[in-house]
Image: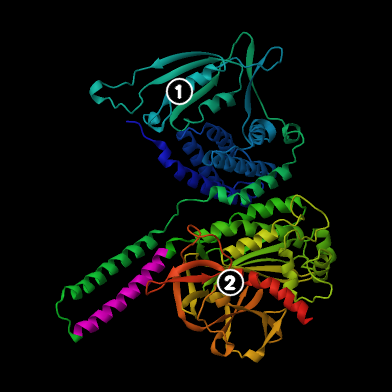
Amino acid sequence: MSIDLTQFQQTFFEESMEGLDDMEANLLQLEVGAVDNEQINSIFRAAHSIKGGSATFGFDQIAGFTHVLETLLDEMREGQRDVTTDAVDVLLQSVDILRSMINAIQNSSTYDEARAEDIQSRLESILHGGEQASEVTSVTVTTKDNSTQGIGWNISFTPHASMMQTGNDTVRIFRELEEYGELKVVVNTNDVPKFSEYIPEDSYLSWQLTLLTEVDKTVIDDVFAWVEDECDLNIEAIVDEKNTTVTTSSPEPLSTLQSTSPGQNSTSAVTSASETRATSSKATESASIRVGIDKVDALINMVGELVITQSMLNQFAESEEVTTAQIEQLKNGLGQLERNTRELQESVMSIRMLPISFIFSRFPRMVHDLSNKLDKQVELVMSGEGTELDKTVMEKIGDPMVHLVRNAIDHGIENPDQRAEKGKPAIGKVNLNAYHQGGNIVIEIKDDGAGLDKDRLLSKAREKGLVREDESLSEEQIYQLIFNPGFSTASVVSDVSGRGVGMDVVKKNIISLGGSIDIESKLGIGTTFRVRLPLTLAILDGQTVKVGDEVYIIPLVSIMESIQIKQDMVRQVGGDMEVFKLRDEYLPIIRLHQVFEINRAVEEFENGLLVVVEGSGQRVGLFVDELLGQQQVVIKSLDTNFKKMAGISGATILGDGSVAIIIDIPGMVNLASIQNRDVKRAIA
């Protein structure tokens, strides 16, 4: 019976990506010179697992490429080759190639085959003399006229008993050998058992092969790459005593043999590859999640508690008469049910929570590549990697963080000469930090670079017509200008940044997650971007408010304060536009009953409440009838059945079964943004 291996491919893809991440992290920590056995063993194991898995699934290109990579790592692991900067760079690029190969198979797309061949040839160049091995010499067959000529190879091939069970086929191996020359095959059947002891899935044969060819031994090694761990293999050169002799020679030095392809800039190639990896998170988003056994155990315990509570409540349903004591027990049972439900909810949500190190792990490589490309010295300091975040939020925040870190290195960190002139250390610092604050997670991207020039930002904004000449802005509002589409102060456009593309997308993506982004900066000292995100997109803490006969939910994290005002405290500008002055700041007022066209709602300010909310760096006042209470609500998306409407982020089902709309605060702020601009113009 054949086994359908496709059902296991997704697991292979996920484990391979994790292995590549481990390889990359360890390669970045390798020190030039002596080999760190623990690190090189971790890298080798990851490469070996990828090679074995890809061979099993028939991904021959991945297996063949990884075999060359693994051979180089094996020589380092055995102490036959020192770690060099060039070798590490090529190995890092090899990780990028493998990642693109796996992505191509997973998404039925293509990858850069020419670059893959170039990197593989560079690996082979290092193996065969591009860099000098410390102990090993190479064997060459030399004729009397001193011209190099291969004669052939004697191959002893004995598969292990289980080799056929991994999907390998000796016939295919022999057919591939025949492509390189004349092949003679002699089979050995001495190990075939009696029929009563015969196991059909096992292999009992061995072969003695003679291949007459001029190809190098590495070509023969590649043919057996998929089975080298599943067989006993011995390959020896055939020597013709009349015409040839076998000699040994040391490899030529690195300077004479190592090369890159014409026109290939190795640093640019590395940077391009790391950018591809950093911005392709959507292509590799996992459909599964790894869960710790402790979380599963907690979930099982909660279900057990629910079963016990259900049994207790069922007793009251079976009773024909209910006594006062039973009513008290019923209340206790309902309270216990509420506690169990809340704990079950927390346990289920914790399953989706992953440490933010899954995002942070991509940045050491990116900082390494970008700093090399920009000729800057940058140290990346990470903290709070264990802070947990919902998997869905994490997958969507990856790209915005990439843009912020790239800009910190490109625009923020100065080159060593500029830093020396300012009395700063030559090595700049980029700090990534994550921590919980209330019901949010806060991610900080901080650099000790040049900082933001407020005057230059404001001048550029006025030049582009984003700000009027007579309009005054606060410091925070000036910094927020960098998130406008097409806004850039870069004097030189490069392939790293300077086109004004990216920062507007950063803010848009963060807002779409129900988050916000703030900026703190001091000229000449540095800049801090502070991103606030909800821990999960499934549940939020909300304030229920009443508007007419309807109930709405306002996210609690967006509420600054609630106040009661009088009509004479409100000014009307521009016709029907209403504003309220709160501590020297004029806030646009949005009457929710007008936005949602609700009848029988409170219209006099004295009889209602003004809820001051903040979103996208701006504040507005939402006028409602009354506040009802605070509660956690489960967010239900409306996108499936309704078109997108500004000011609405979803809905929830309340305890009485009614549906309440969840207000999108950034959307409401956007509705008021034009009003806000007109208000300032009218007041000025």
Q: Magenta segment, principal secondary structure?
A: helix
Q: Is residue 498 left or right of residue 588?
A: right
Residue 552 rendering spot, x and y as whole percentages: 49, 75
The residue sitting at 49% across, 31% down in the picture is 226
**Mark 1 or mark 2, which is nearer to you?**
2
Amino acid carrying label 1: it is: Phe
Q: Give the image quarter of residue 190.
A: top left
Gap between marks 1 and 2 measured at Cα: 70 Å
Residue 103 rendering spot, x and y as whole percentages: 56, 42
Residue lying farthest top?
242
Q: Is residue 493 above or below residue 128?
A: below
Picture disc at residue 665: 2
Mark 1 lies on residue: 157
Which residues, given as a range, are shown in magenta? 325-348
Q: Is residue 517 left or right of residue 351?
A: right
The residue sitting at 62% across, 35% down in the picture is 135
> Is residue 39 visible in the rendered structure shown here?
no
The residue sitting at 58% across, 72% down in the picture is 665
In primary-sequence order, the first of circles 1 and 2 is 1
In the structure shown, which secondary structural element does the residue marked by tag 1 occupy? Answer: strand
Residue 145 rendering spot, x and y as whole percentages: 71, 12
Which quadrant would the C terminus be assigned to in this image?
bottom right
Cβ atoms under marks 1 and 2 closer than 8 Å: no
Which quadrant would the N terminus be assigned to in this image?
top left
Picture disc at residue 7: none
Residue 650 rendering spot, x and y as whole percentages: 50, 66
> Is residue 574 visible in the rendered structure shown here?
yes
The residue sitting at 66% across, 53% down in the picture is 366
Is residue 623 or residue 308 the one in the foreground? 623
